[in-house]
Image: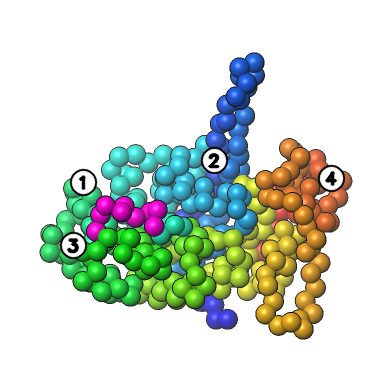
Amino acid sequence: MNKKNNDTTDVLLNVKNLKVHFPVSSRSIFNKKRNVIKAVDGISFSVKKGETFGLVGESGCGKSTTARTIVRLNNPSAGNIEFEHKDIAHARGQELLHMRRDVQMIFQDPYASLNPRMTVGSLISEPLRILRHYKILSLSNAEIEARVDRLLEQVGLKPSMKKRFPHEFSGGQRQRIGIARSIVTYPKLVIADEPISALDVSVQAQIINLMNSLQKEFGLTYIFIAHDLTVVNYISDRIAVMYLGSIVESAPANILNKNPLHPYTRMLWDAILVPHPDSTRSLAHANVKGEAYETSVTSGCPFYDRCPLRMERCKTQNPPLKALDKHHHVACWLY
């Protein structure tokens, strides 16, 4: 597959030691201790202008929480989120509105994310009208309508459809509407949170191709989130693998494809179906059992209970994300 060449060194987004913890109160009247769910537990990564950064992992690993925290739908518990070298982790008011003009999100469910009482034209134009109300953008009604019509055409729909309601469209068409709404402010960064997981396989390919063409046309930067490593590998320039709130491996897509190092990353590769029945690919980690949220380890490697290559130190020492070279990082005591 062909990968995009991205020679730029300009960092658009820099996430440093991000933590998102959710307190959980005990239901017992005798135990008032508050436990904490560590949805995201100290991750760091950067995204360069014009690239697609893939974030992959099983359900419950913290991918969506990371996305929602970057766009500030969740508040971080600790850490920094720098967008264009400005910390947005604690942005408020006008500063937050300015950030949301440049950072938009495509949600997983193309129906639940669209207000069923609003027409398509109103849904797509709403971000522009909000930004105009707060004097962040100055666009006339005619300019807003013209932009909505143009975007509908660019995502493969007809401008005449803008008077319809979301329930009148198929799942793939609704996701196209969601994509049009996410880019209507001409953002610099778009976070796609599993944008194809709710769609048929044939429609998934259409949406991926649409996102690629829009990226070239508008100069977009993507964070693409999915649990399917095949899809993430196809669209991404660089990939980070998450497990239970931590990044366990990160590398350019072509390197991760040829040489996955962390046992969990290898497990994800083993889970990919091979179309040829005579394939001799080794499934060395296909016997990994359990779920991502099942762990009895509190201080060691979070993958310890499921890892077929675990060692004694893995139970008590959590490996840091170590740079093996300039591009490849892995958190595992094997390296």
Dot placed on the residue nearer the N-terminal end, 4 or 2: 2
Quadrant position of residue 40: top right
Q: Which residues are magenta?
A: 111-119
Is residue 292 located in the magenta-colored stretch of the structure?
no
Kindly check if marks 4 and 3 are in contact, taking CB atoms under 8 A apart as contact. no
Q: Which mark is residue 313?
A: 4
Measure the alpha-carbon separation of dots 1 and 2. 30 Å
Furthest residue to the right?
A: 312
Circle 1: is it few (<14), some (14-19), or many (20+) Cα within 10 Å?
few
In the rendered view of the protein, which quadrant contains the N terminus?
bottom right
Q: Residue at x 61, y 66 (%)?
A: 229
> Which residue is identified by label 3?
144
In the rendered view of the protein, which quadrant contains the C terminus?
bottom right
Q: Secondary structure at mark 2?
A: strand
Measure the alpha-carbon separation of dots 4 and 3. 60 Å
Amino acid tagged 1: Tyr
Circle 3: is it few (<14), some (14-19), or many (20+) Cα within 10 Å?
some
Q: Which mark is residue 77?
A: none
> Which residue is identified by label 1?
134
Comparing labels 3 and 1, the label whose residue is closer to the camera: 3
Kindly check if marks 3 and 1 are in contact, taking CB atoms under 8 A apart as contact. no
Q: Position of residue 11 (x, y in %)?
A: 47, 60
